[in-house]
Image: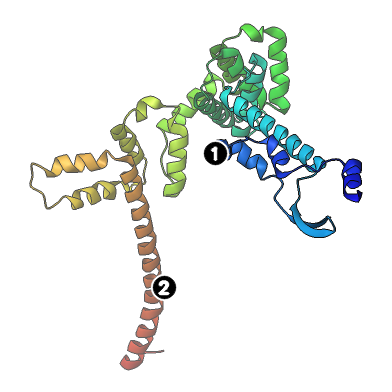
């Protein structure tokens, strides 16, 4: 009677089959999801009492565990379905607006061009700045004139910034071509008269008291203002060698000739001409000769000092041997 009362009060206990209702009824038909869900609550042996006898029963047989298991099953299935659906859908890329594209280009240009241009009276600084601007515009493949002008003036500061404000008050910058901008820029910071002056400086450039390194740096800097004189390697090398000091210039050609002196008469002039056409080789030879000349001058100076001290002592000794006054 006590047993029937206990059953009426607590209700019939669910069996292992009740827990399995949330999965396939046929164990052979279990799919991967059912297997995963079935293992969400691992079996655990917990002692309970039945008919005053302690017996092991797996957790999950109660109605609460059954509901929890079914809830977890639904959540996992919904998650798997959502992930599968999102994986099948292509990624939608939001197209940038023209303003966003322009801002992106300006930021990239700002990182590539850390140097500011403040104006000033030195035309070389202005020309160097414009060369850097055009190099970066080419590397970024910027072709729109208005955007090129925006980028070229983005790094203006001080005097250059004030000048550009005056320009924008006189011209419609939105309709201005990039060539017109360059014309105005060079008219302000690199007038044609100054360019002609630098061309003359390159035409008359000689080494003088400069070292080979100093001469080569100035040669390279000024050569861009006289492109017709350095249009190819041979002309550039010839101009460089012609400006070297009289002490070094003949030796440059002589060293080239010495390299090929063992060749026959038919090949020697051709090989020598080819060597002289290489600008980098001419600079290298000039540096070697300069170092060699410095070493020779140092040795000659030491010899003079020794010789200046030597004859006086030898002369005194000779006089003493001849009986003359010491």
Query: In this rendering, which labeled residue sits more in front, label 2 or label 1?
Result: 1
Percent position of residue 301, x then y: 40, 67
Q: Nearer the viewer, residue 286 or 109?
A: 109
Residue 40's label in the rendered image is none
Percent position of residue 56, x then y: 75, 57
Quadrant that contains the C terminus: bottom left
Percent position of residue 138, x then y: 50, 24
The residue at the point 17 percent across, 42 percent down is: 271
The residue at the point 62 percent across, 33 percent down is: 111
**Mark 2: which secondary structure?**
helix
Percent position of residue 175, x then y: 62, 6
Residue extending furthest front? 1
Residue 305's label in the rendered image is 2
Q: Is residue 279 above or below residue 296?
A: above
Q: Nearer the viewer, residue 291 or 201?
A: 291
Q: Is residue 89 above or below residue 59?
A: above
Q: Nearer the viewer, residue 179 or 99?
A: 99
Q: Is residue 23 above or below residue 306?
A: above
Residue 115: image quadrant is top right
| In the displayed structure image, the side of residue 259 where residue 185 appears, left or right | right
Mark 1, other Cα within 10 Å: few <14 / some 14–19 / many ≥20: few
| In the displayed structure image, the side of residue 93 where residue 158 appears, left or right | right
On the question of residue 247 being in view, the answer is no
Q: Is residue 289 above or below residue 31?
A: below
Residue 28's label in the rendered image is 1
**Are the residues tagged 2 and 1 within 8 Å (C-beta)?**
no
């Amino acid at each position: 009677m006590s047993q029937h009362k206990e059953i009426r009060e607590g209700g019939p206990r669910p069996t292992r089959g009740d827990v399995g209702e949330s999965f396939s009824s046929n164990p052979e038909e279990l799919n991967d999801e059912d297997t995963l869900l079935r293992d969400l609550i691992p079996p655990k042996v917990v002692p309970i009492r039945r008919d005053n006898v302690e017996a092991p029963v797996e957790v999950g047989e109660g109605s609460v565990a059954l509901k929890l298991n079914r809830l977890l099953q639904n959540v996992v299935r919904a998650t798997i379905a959502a992930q599968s659906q999102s994986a099948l859908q292509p990624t939608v890329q939001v197209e940038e607006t023209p303003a966003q594209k322009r801002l992106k280009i300006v930021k990239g240009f700002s990182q590539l061009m850390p140097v500011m241009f403040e104006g000033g009276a030195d035309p070389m600084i202005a020309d160097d700045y414009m060369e850097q601007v055009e190099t970066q515009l080419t590397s970024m493949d910027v072709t729109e004139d208005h955007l090129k002008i925006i980028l070229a003036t983005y790094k203006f500061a001080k005097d250059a910034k004030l000048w550009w404000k005056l320009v924008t008050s006189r011209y419609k910058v939105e309709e201005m071509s990039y060539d017109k901008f360059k014309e105005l820029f060079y008219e302000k910071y690199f007038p044609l008269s100054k360019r002609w002056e630098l061309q003359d400086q390159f035409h008359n450039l000689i080494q003088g008291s400069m070292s080979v390194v100093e001469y080569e740096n100035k040669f390279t800097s000024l050569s861009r203002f006289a492109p017709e004189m350095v249009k190819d390697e041979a002309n550039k090398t010839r101009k460089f060698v012609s400006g070297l000091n009289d002490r070094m210039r003949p030796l440059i050609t002589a060293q080239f000739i010495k390299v090929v002196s063992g060749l026959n008469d038919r090949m020697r002039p051709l090989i020598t001409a080819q060597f002289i056409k290489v600008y980098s080789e001419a600079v290298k030879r000039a540096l070697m000769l300069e170092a060699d000349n410095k070493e020779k001058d140092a040795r000659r100076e030491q010899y003079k000092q020794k010789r200046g001290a030597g004859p006086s002592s030898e002369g005194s000794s000779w006089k003493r041997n001849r009986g003359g006054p010491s």
